[in-house]
Structures are given as structure tokens and as C-alpha cells.
Image (cartoon, rainbow, N blue to C red):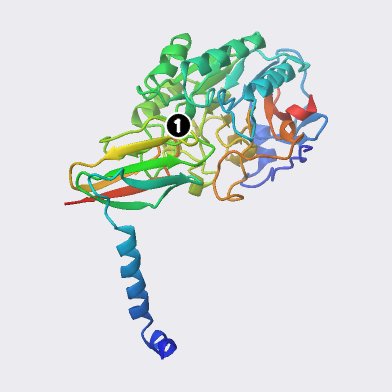
Amino acid sequence: MRFRLAAHYPYLIAGGLLVAAIGVAQAPARAADAGFAAKIANFAFAPPTITVHTGGAVTWTNADDDPHTVYADNGAFKSHALDTGDSFTQTFATPGVYSYHCSLHPYMVGKVVVQR
Amino acid sequence: MADRPHHPPVDDGLIGRRGMLKCMAWAGTGVLWTVSGGVASSVLVGGAQAASAGAFSFVQISDTHVGFNKAANPDPIATLHDAIAHVKALPQQPAFVLHTGDITHLSKPEQFDTADQILKDLGVPVFHVPGEHDTLDDGNGKVYLDRYGPMTKAKGTGYYSFDHGGVHFIALINVVGLTGGGSGSLGADQIQWLAEDVAGLSSSTPIVVFAHMPLWDVYAPWGWGTSDAPAALEHLKRFGSVTVLNGHIHQVTRKVEGNIAFHTARSTAYPQPAPGAAPSPGPLTVPAGELHGVLGVRDIRVVRGQHDLAITDQTLASA
């Protein structure tokens, strides 16, 4: 039955999974939290999109053998060069979408969505 | 690891190379490279072997990454010393050295100090451009500019030019003010300066451009290119011989486009993977004993009256 449903309504199943995935990824960090733990690994920000509530924080930790930075596209925030194992924490006081990149390797991009 | 014989597709993208060589006073394109483990040599195509009269040579070193200390090379200072010893053992001593950036790993003043101290052993002037690892200070490259800018009367983000032996050398900066999602960038001001810098030159003047990041798209998924390089190169198309020297990717690649020959160089610190050969372009750790075979320097010989710039890439294992 399950198989038949999937076969006939693959989009329903896919849609359900998508909602579930977003639900997990968007579990917002609380203001009092240490923040969302993000990773920089293999020259990529992981996860690429992070959602927090207003006042929430994100902490990026570099797991690569090369330094990286977390650099807001609009200049709103900027980390120092993060060597292997170094971390950077940014608190987000204002709702909005913050696109950022690594200033050494600008093809590395990510986004923080700050919700009320 | 013995250096693999480098037989680039010399004719790829070349239109009528023989004809071009005949009608041009200088060409950076007619060089057939033969690089092997023990001896590096180059064969000049369509011209006589290098004569000594009126000749000079210069050396390119790159990506010294002073301050790096990871598994790919725990001691880049030692390999930099080895690279300098290699240069000093060259049969023809260079008039000067071009360093194509990433002098340091983290832009720390003490890392610049160490690099400068070691590079003094070369005994010849060193001309710099910054890599992205040299502009990590809070001033986005101010530390670099304060240190190296005055020697060359650098403009803007640090670009400058100079002449030696009839060749016009141009230092371009493509690692400052990079924007998200892109690759290297020169910026409109620098391109305008370039146009003015070459405006008065005869088209037969040989041009050597050096910058950190490649000025052609080596591999876009890793950002190995410079987004506005085509606009800059437009100003160099009328010249008969343009040689572009870059670092950044820690390996030798080359490409010929019209009269412009592009070359990327090895690092003296650590190798990086071939484009797409690893999940990321991070430092590549090679088996013990093979490091010197993947690090290197580049010797460039300019011979007046001959048709070629003879370029040889030498690994530190061939010392």
C-alpha cells in the first residue's frame, strides 16, 4: 500500500519529507542559547542556511586545514581569519536575511535567516 | 614523487603558431616545456637556443605560506630555505624575484617579518603581490601595503609596474574586496589604471603580468579565476607577447590564448589537489618523502633578439 501510494503520489511523499527536513533545519535557536553550532568543512558552510529567532546566535567553527572567514555580504559582521579549530559567534538582533561568504574563498557562501 | 614530464597541449587554442612566431618580435608562446625529475630544461620552438648576450632571467616563487603548520607541511620555513638554495644554485642568477603572493598564512606581522628575513638570502630584489592570505588584517591589506607598497610606489590596492631589460612588468592585485559567490577580482579602478599604464607602450614591448589568483578560469567551482580578468586582458591583446604568471593553486597549469600565455606556479609550502580531484581545494598531504617533488620554483629567461621567453618549472626535488 505504501509502495503504491509512493508510486502514484511521489510528490506527496517528497513534499512530506521536505516539510520534515525544513522543520529540522529551522529549529530556531533561543536567545539564551549558546547559539546554533555551524561548521566550516571542506570549503563549505554547513548547513548553508541557518534560521534563528531575533536575539539568537550562530557559532561557526572551522574544521579545515585552511583558514576561512565569515563575512557578511553587506559588511554587517566580519570574523577574523579562523584557523583550524577557531570559532566565531555572531548574535542577530534584527530580523532579516543575512547572506555571507568567506573573504578568502568567496565562492563559499551561506545565509542566516533571523525570524521574529 | 618525480615530477611528471610536462607536455602541455602546446597547440591547443593556438592559431598558426609558426606564422605568428615569424611575424612577431617577441612571443611568450613558443616554449615547449620539458620538465623531468632530475633536470628541467626548456626547448625554444622556432628559435635558436638561448644566447647569453643581452639576456637576463628572473624567478617566480609563490605561496610560501609562512605560518602554516598542518600535516601537508609542518615546516614551510624549511622548504622556503630549500627553494632559495635552489634559486641560488641556478646556472644563471636572476636579476630579481617575483613573489606571486600568499607570503604568509595568516597576515601576522611576525609572519611577514620571517618571510622578509628569509627572502633576503636571495640577494636580489623581490617584487610582491599579495595573496588572500596576506590581506587578512582588519585593514583588508593595509599591513601588506604599508610594508611593500612604498618600494614600488604602488597605487590603489597595491598595483604597480616597472621595466627591466626592455620588458614591461605589471603587478596586479586580485585578492582584495572579493564579493560573495565570486572569484578573484581586479576592480574598475585597477583596470582603468592598467589601460593608462600600457597606453604609451609599443605593441612589440614584451609584457609580463603577475598576480596571485589565476587570470583565467582554471576551475570555477573552486573559484580559481578572476571574474573581471577579460576586461583587463582586453588592454593587452594588441601586444605581441604577453606572459601571465599566477600562484594560488599550488600547481603548474598553463594555457595559451592568442598572444597571451598563462602559467600558474607551484608553491614552496604545500601542494593542492588537481581541479575537482578532491572534495575541496584544501592543502594536500602527500606521502612522506614526496613533498619536495611537488614544491617548486620557476625560472624565466628573457633573451633579447630571440623570439621566446624560456620558462622552466623546477621542483625542489631536482636540486
**Residue lying furthest right:** B38
Viewer-closest of B75 and B170: B75
Mark 1, residues whose alpha carbon is within 10 Å: few (<14), some, or many (≥20)? some
What residue is drawn where x is 38% and y is 52%? A48
Secondary structure of the residue carrying numbered label 1? helix
Q: Kindly identify which residue carries mark 1.
A: B235
Expressed as whole percent of the image width and height from the top left, the position of residue B285 reads 66, 39
Q: Is residue A83 left or right of residue A60?
A: right
**Can residue B190 be seen by looking at this rendering?**
yes
**Residue lying furthest front:** A32
What residue is drawn where x is 80% and y is 35%? B36
Viewer-closest of B300 and A112: A112
Question: What chain does badge 1 belong to?
Answer: B
Expressed as whole percent of the image width and height from the top left, the position of residue B127 reads 55, 16
Viewer-closest of B16 and B32: B32
What residue is drawn where x is 43% and y is 23%? B199
Expressed as whole percent of the image width and height from the top left, the position of residue B57 reads 68, 18
Amino acid type, label 1: His
Expressed as whole percent of the image width and height from the top left, the position of residue B155 reads 39, 17
Viewer-closest of B256 and B140: B140
